[in-house]
Amino acid sequence: MVITTRLKKLPSKLLFSRNHPFASFSQTLSARSNLPHYKDNPDKAKDNWNTNHSFVLSNPILSLLENKCKSISQLKQIQSQMIITGLISDGLASSRLIAFCALSEMADLSYCKTLLCSLRNPNAFSYNVSIRAFSDGENPIEAFILYKQMLCAWSNSGLRPDKYTFPLLFKTCTRLSFFYLGFEILVHVIKLGYERNIYVHNALIHFLASFGELDIARMVFNENCVRDLVSWNSLINGYVKSGKALNALRIFREMETEGVKPDEVTMIGLVLSCGQLEDLVLGREFHQRIEEYGLNLTVPLGNALMDMYVKCGELDEAKALFDRMEKKTVVSWTTMVVGYAKLGLLDIARKLFDEMPEKDVVPWNALISGYVQIKHCKEALALFSEMQAMNVMPDQVTMVSCLSACTQIGALDVGIWLHQYIERNNISINVALGTALIDMYAKCGNISKALQIFKEMPARNSLTWTAIICGLAYHGDSSDALSHFFEMIQIGLVPDEVTFLGVLSACCHGGLVEEGRKIFAQMSSKFNIPPKLKHYSCMVDLLGRAGLLEEAEELIKSMPMEADAVVWGALFFACRINKNVEMGEKAAMKLLELDPQDSGIYVLLASMYIEANMWHKSREVRKMMKERGVDKTPGCSSIEVKGDVWEFMVKDKSHPQCDEIYQCLMELKRQMELVEYSADVPLLEYDLLISSNSCC
């Protein structure tokens, strides 16, 4: 049996010992007993605890408990009568007391446990209902402690777990992410012979699927000849949660072949699969089937359909569903906010966000991320401040978005404050958040701090290595960037196209032509990553800076795609540095073909002619610029001062210290003239800058 085979691969400490069949379970439980409490939704409705058993309804005391009892105080009075009359010794009667304490609206789990321990011969139902209550409550670890007591009772009185006990335990293991403890419980299942029971079988499939053990879950599913709809649903939704939508759809086709009719849970999984695949046609087909099957459009199913339409880019259909929903949950509102935010429709997203009756961290994250994606970073950080004022605790996703905003605008001080906020609030630094911190520090100018965080991270993925490689390249530390790249390869991580972009940039900054050629060739030959336009532009820049203009031009001609402005711009820049006017003219003409309204190209071309003493050509360019109605694009720059980011445009006089800024600028001009200023920026551009009173 596959379960037995899988158990043999587990650490020996998890298997039961010769002295006590469940000794290792007790040891593992003791190690887990200091876990924090888990809080459920306080509005969660309690399960119906009542019974229609004839003995209960015909007994005056028990009937009073079922129909009239409204508090624990009244329950204790009924319990006293049961003790006086001896009814407490009846297993069924005492189990009704336990059921009231565990599942009624007046539930008291502390008294439930006390009552259970006081019973002389509690039955399996009493234990099961208590385990169920604790499993769904604030402290689910207590469910395993009760199970341990149940095992002790088995040794003393013959009471043993039944087919209803183990599904509850598997469910609790899933909730608490107790993978190996779940396998210890599986040992008990096999020992007691419940592995082929349909309830236990379904719970086991769900447990395995929840932890991504889908191959084993599928084998367990195949081994049991008795399956019901829950079996199929557990497998389908397991594949969906693991992002394996195609597998989920294949299971559904098998389910159809066997004539099993789907229910709401099945359709939720299938609709979510269509969302993952962004398959609108199939999603609409399943939407139609829901109507054909006569299934009720419940809130979870409606939310799943909305999510599918949002991921497929059909916001109108999602909004139509949203508007028709009689009851909207936080998930419903959040789905729409996420949809509009991802498409950059932030005005609509913000309007919906403001209308939400209640908000958790997810819609805040969606809106902040949306602002960051369209580069409205100030708005994103302002929203984070608003989130704090509303006492909504941010999570790792929030902090990643805020750090990304700081990265885009170079707000190092704000980024440092966010890092301190993360530490103060004990927000766990996972791989994504650590990578965002590295990227922020590197791009905002503190590469030493970025390296420190990189070295301190216990776990790193390819994105983490890429961030530090690109950061080192950005700071001109070419040799260190390459050493990190080779170390990344050595430990078995696979670079992506962004990694290669960082490595090629490092070669470009360091003038490492041979290394650049080799790495560029290995992209496709060794790593099967076809170079894109940005990689070609890096190589053109590398070759051009080294004076290999003909090789750079040949590389452009050999490209499998048309060169864009970035590629031609790299060649044009190289021609200016190497004073190759003829080739520079060709590159400039290509740039003007691509964007005849780009004022920067005209300015740079005129500057190149001035540097070559070709004044007539320069005047022709300026004339052409005037005839085509091209105006020089105003320059813009930003600077962070004490956590505030200031932006300046040409002729900008909005800053309160405008006069001092212009005075400083003129002083800089005077000092540069004294030392016979010479730089890569041509004199024409410099004169234009000063004559426009720019403070960029």
Image (tube, grey):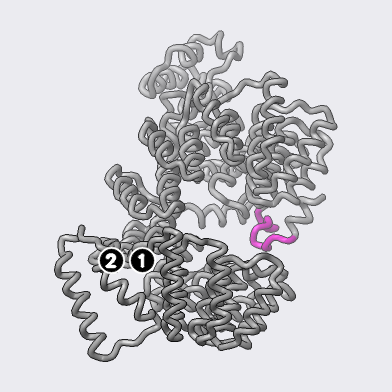
Q: Residues within 10 Å of mark 1 (few under 14, many from 20)?
A: many
Residue located 58% across and 75% down the image = 586
For residue 437, side relative to residue 249 (left or right): left
Residue matched to label 2? 640
Residue 166 visible in the current orientation: no
Instruction: Tell me if residue 684 is in the magenta stretch.
Output: no
- Judging depth in this view, the residue of 31 and 347 nearest the camera is 347
Q: Disc count in the image?
A: 2
Q: Percent x, y for residue 289?
A: 71, 25
Gap between marks 1 and 2 measured at Cα: 7 Å
Q: Residues within 10 Å of mark 2 (few under 14, many from 20)?
A: some
- The quarter of the rendered structure image containing the C terminus is bottom left
Residue 648 against residue 220 in the figure, above or below:
below
Residue matched to label 1? 410
Residue located 51% across and 57% down the image = 31
Specify the farthest residue to the bottom.
675
Q: Which residues are magenta?
A: 9-20
Residue 480 against residue 321 in the figure, above or below:
below
Residue 566, quarter of the rendered image = bottom right
Residue 262 against residue 482 in the figure, above or below:
above
Q: Are marks 1 and 2 in contact (CB under 8 Å)?
A: yes
**Residue 142 tag number:** none
Q: Percent x, y for residue 506?
A: 53, 80
Q: Percent x, y for residue 172?
A: 56, 43
Magenta-drawn stretch, dominant element (helix, strand or loop): loop
Which amino acid type is marked by label 1? Gly
Q: Percent x, y for residue 613?
A: 43, 86
